[in-house]
């Protein structure tokens, strides 16, 4: 396993729509996913999409455990989503703080669906179908945007709630952090 370089905003690789994974038996896929998990954990992220490491494939890893970037986030067990699709989204939305390993040190408030349904394949090629809400739904929507070449900063409605973490009084007083 290896800690990979995370590409940053401005790199054209982040703008490319990812291609579906077609070979679930490839050892390279398994190794890449293990590297993604190690990288996400090293940088204390809660999600990582393959485009963030320069790989144009529809792969997402996510996991939430106690860390200093998300002190009040709910725990979510490690999950690997391959070729994910959102099958339904609630009309109810939530405004929450998001950050991104590709935009280090920045946070912004983004509106996301409160609840989503999705389907994806796991690393063994088995189809998963789930409905999630809150922070879990936010993470998946954020990471799915990466698969489509979209950064969370493009979803901001109010630029007064976007900036560096240490310079945002609203972020400092928010009490709970609402994304990756």
Image: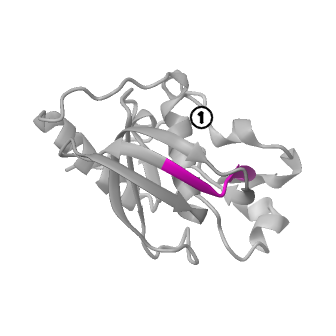
Q: Which residues are magenta?
A: 108-117
Quadrant showing the C terminus:
bottom right
Label 1 sits on a secondary structure element that is loop
Is 14 rendered above or below residue 69? above
Nearest the eye: 123 or 34:
123
Q: Position of residue 37 (x, y in %)?
A: 31, 54
- Residue in view at x 65 percent, y 42 percent: 152
- Residue in view at x 49 percent, y 23 percent: 17
In screen coordinates, is 83 left or right of 46? Answer: left
Nearest the eye: 39 or 116:
116
Nearest the eye: 115 or 28:
115
Image colouring: one colour
- Residue in view at x 42 percent, y 55 percent: 130
Say whether residue 134 is visible.
yes
The residue to which callout 1 is attached is: 9
Q: Position of residue 75 (x, y in %)?
A: 45, 73
- Residue in view at x 33 percent, y 62 percent: 78
Say whether residue 101 is visible.
no
Toward which corner of the image does residue 95 lie, by quadrant?
bottom right
- Chief secondary structure of the magenta span? strand
In screen coordinates, is 144 left or right of 127? Answer: right
Q: Position of residue 121 (x, y in %)?
A: 30, 43
Q: Position of residue 133 (x, y in %)?
A: 57, 62
Marker count (numbered): 1
Mark 1 neighbour density, 10 Å: few (under 14) some (14–19) many (20 or more):
some
In screen coordinates, is 61 left or right of 25? Answer: right
Q: Residue 21: say if magenta.
A: no
């Amino acid at each position: 396993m290896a800690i990979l370089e995370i590409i940053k905003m401005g790199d054209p690789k982040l703008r490319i729509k990812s291609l579906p994974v077609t070979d679930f038996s490839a050892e390279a896929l398994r190794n890449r996913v293990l590297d993604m998990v190690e990288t996400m954990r090293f940088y204390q992220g809660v999600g990582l999409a393959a485009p963030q490491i320069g790989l144009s494939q529809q792969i997402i890893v996510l996991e939430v455990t106690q860390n200093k970037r998300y002190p009040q986030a709910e725990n979510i067990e490690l999950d690997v989503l391959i070729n994910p699709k959102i099958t339904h989204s609630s009309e109810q939305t939530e405004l929450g703080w998001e950050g991104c390993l590709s935009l280090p040190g920045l946070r912004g408030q983004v509106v996301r669906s409160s609840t989503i349904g999705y389907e994806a394949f796991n690393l063994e090629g088995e189809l998963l179908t789930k409905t999630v809400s809150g922070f879990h739904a936010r993470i998946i929507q954020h990471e799915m945007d990466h698969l489509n070449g979209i950064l969370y900063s493009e979803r901001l409605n109010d630029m007064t709630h976007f900036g560096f973490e240490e310079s945002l009084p609203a972020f400092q007083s928010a009490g709970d952090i609402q994304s990756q």
